[in-house]
Amino acid sequence: MKDKRPPGVFVPAKIPARAPVDRDSIRRALAEDTPKGDITTRLTVPQNATARANLVAKQALTVAGMDVFKAVFAQVAPSIRVGLKIRDGARANKGEVMAQVTGPANAVLTAERVALNFLIHACSVATLTASFVEAVRGTGAVILDTRKTTPGLRDLEKYAVLCGGGANHRRDLSAMVLIKENHIAMAGGVAKAVAMARKGAPRRFVEIEVENLDQLEEALAAGADMALLDNMSPAMMEKAVRQNKGRALLEASGNMTIKRVARVARTGVDFISVGALTHSAPAVDLSLLVEVARR
């Protein structure tokens, strides 16, 4: 089968040189945390105090979002210096110093929580992704993310998936045609939905969700580029792979867990999408520990 995937879609990509830094999101987060300033820091920290703090991994984790962490401090006070000691996509060991932050103590303390919130979330997504990637290693299956993302943080979360070794599915509704069950119902069936998509956008990549082998055959006959096997058992997925005979790409989706994903990967599907990567990643443990404070 000729691979008709859009360039850069559904394949593990090289991690971009820099994380997506959304300065509007940073401004909103800081405004949320300090609507009338940081009263505790204002009352207890001398104005001329300087702080040096170490960002420490309290557990083993996969790193993502270091540039965002740095950007939060810059937004609060350009004089803060953040020295990064590890790159995105790397594995940090428990106890490892990931960055050193130096600058006005009041600004460092005010920015601390927002900077950690962004970084913890990105590292959490990357760490969970890395676990899924490791679970399917050697099978040929690629772990994909979904659009089940935190509003306003999609680009950061999808970047974190890349840092964890996964790949990005479509970024948004404009990126490609993905026909789901509600579209199928409104169109009047699988074949009609694919035909309508082909007529309206003949050069666009078309994926369609199927729930059983009859729908899969209908989708293949209609010329779909990719079929999303929705909530199928591994046994049914194996039948789908045999029935497909390489005519289209196959994506498995639905209730993917670390325990289940290896079995699904062994069925021979090309991709496995995991919504949990972005909506249910357990928070990793990071701390910003003040090492030196002086006046």
Image (cartoon, helix red, strand yellow):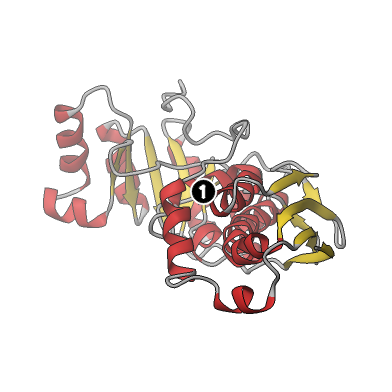
Considering depth in this image, is 271 or 63 the residue closer to the camera? 63
- In the image, taking residue 43 as reference, residue 29 lies left or right, namely left
Crowd band around label 1 with a 10 angstrom C-alpha radius: few (<14), some (14–19), many (20+): many
Residue 223 pos. (x, y %)? 29, 31
Q: Is mark 1 on a helix, strand or loop?
A: helix
Say whether residue 231 is visible. Answer: no
Residue placed at 17% from the left, 34% from the top? 195
Q: In this view, does 44 lie above or below 197?
A: below
- In the image, taking residue 231 as reference, residue 167 lies left or right, namely right
Which quarter of the picture shows residue 181?
Answer: bottom left
- In the image, taking residue 197 as reference, residue 108 lies left or right, namely right
Considering depth in this image, is 130 or 92 the residue closer to the camera? 92
Q: In this view, does 175 lie above or below 254?
A: above
Q: Which amino acid does label 1 sit on?
A: Leu
Q: Is residue 155 above or below residue 131?
A: above
Considering depth in this image, is 46 or 38 the residue closer to the camera? 46
Which quarter of the picture shows residue 86?
Answer: top right
Considering depth in this image, is 277 or 218 the residue closer to the camera? 277
Residue 250 pos. (x, y %)? 46, 41
Which quarter of the picture shows residue 201?
Answer: top left
Q: In this view, does 293 lie above or below 253?
A: below
Residue 209 pos. (x, y %)? 33, 50
Residue placed at 20% from the left, 51% from the top? 184
Q: From the image, tell me which residue sits under label 1.
A: 156
Residue placed at 42% from the left, 71% from the top? 35
Say whether residue 279 is visible. Answer: yes
Residue 84 pos. (x, y %)? 75, 44
- In the image, taking residue 240 as reference, residue 178 lies left or right, namely left
